[in-house]
Image (tube, rainbow, N blue to C red):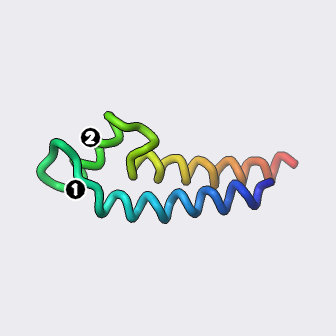
């Protein structure tokens, strides 16, 4: 089960890096502000939200490994 969390977290991180580089936002002058705006509006569907979700999956996998 921990392997699935690691793989899913890695996939989320890779996909989010792609999304953060390519997505356009409604507001913002640079890509960083566009990503933050997308996170506030779309939540986990944004690239930044997926990145944070991927990191959380990997952390949960590590915690589950040590709890066992």
Seen in the picture, residue 2 relative to 39 is either above or below; the reply is: below
Residue 6 picture location, percent across and down? 67, 60
Residue at figure coordinates x 63%, y 57% from the top left: 8
Specify few, some or many for label 2: CA neighbours under 10 Å numbering under 14, 14-19, or 20 or more.
some
Q: 6 or 18: nearer the eye?
A: 18
Tell me the SS state at disc 2.
helix
* Residue beneath the point at 68% across and 47% down: 60
* Image position, residue 51 (x, y; %): 47, 53
Disc 1: which residue: 31
Apparent side of residue 14 relative to residue 7 in the rendered image (left or right):
left
Image spot of residue 36 (x, y percent) = 29, 44
Q: CA distance from mark 2 to mark 1?
A: 10 Å
Which of the labelled discs sits on residue 58, or is there none?
A: none
Q: Which residue is mark 2?
A: 37
Residues marked 2 and 1 touching at CB (< 8 Å): no
**Which element type, helix, strand or loop, lies under badge 1?**
helix
| Residue at the far left in the pictured view | 29
| Image point (49%, 65%), residue name | 14
Nearer to me, 49 or 22: 22
Please determine whether, in this image, residue 27 is positioned above or below residue 9. Answer: above
Residue 46 placement (x, y as % from top left): 38, 46
Quadrant of the frame with the N terminus: bottom right
Write down the quadrant of residue 65 in the picture: bottom right
In the orientation shown, which residue stands out farthest toward the right? 68
Q: Residues within 10 Å of mark 1 (few under 14, many from 20)?
A: some
Mark before the other along the chain sequence, 2 or 1: 1
């Amino acid at each position: 089960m921990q392997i699935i969390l690691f793989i899913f977290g890695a996939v989320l991180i890779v996909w989010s890096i792609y999304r953060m580089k390519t997505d356009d936002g409604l507001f913002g002058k640079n890509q960083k502000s566009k990503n933050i705006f997308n996170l506030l509006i779309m939540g986990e569907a944004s690239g930044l939200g997926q990145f944070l979700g991927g990191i959380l999956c990997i952390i949960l996998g590590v915690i589950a490994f040590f709890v066992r």
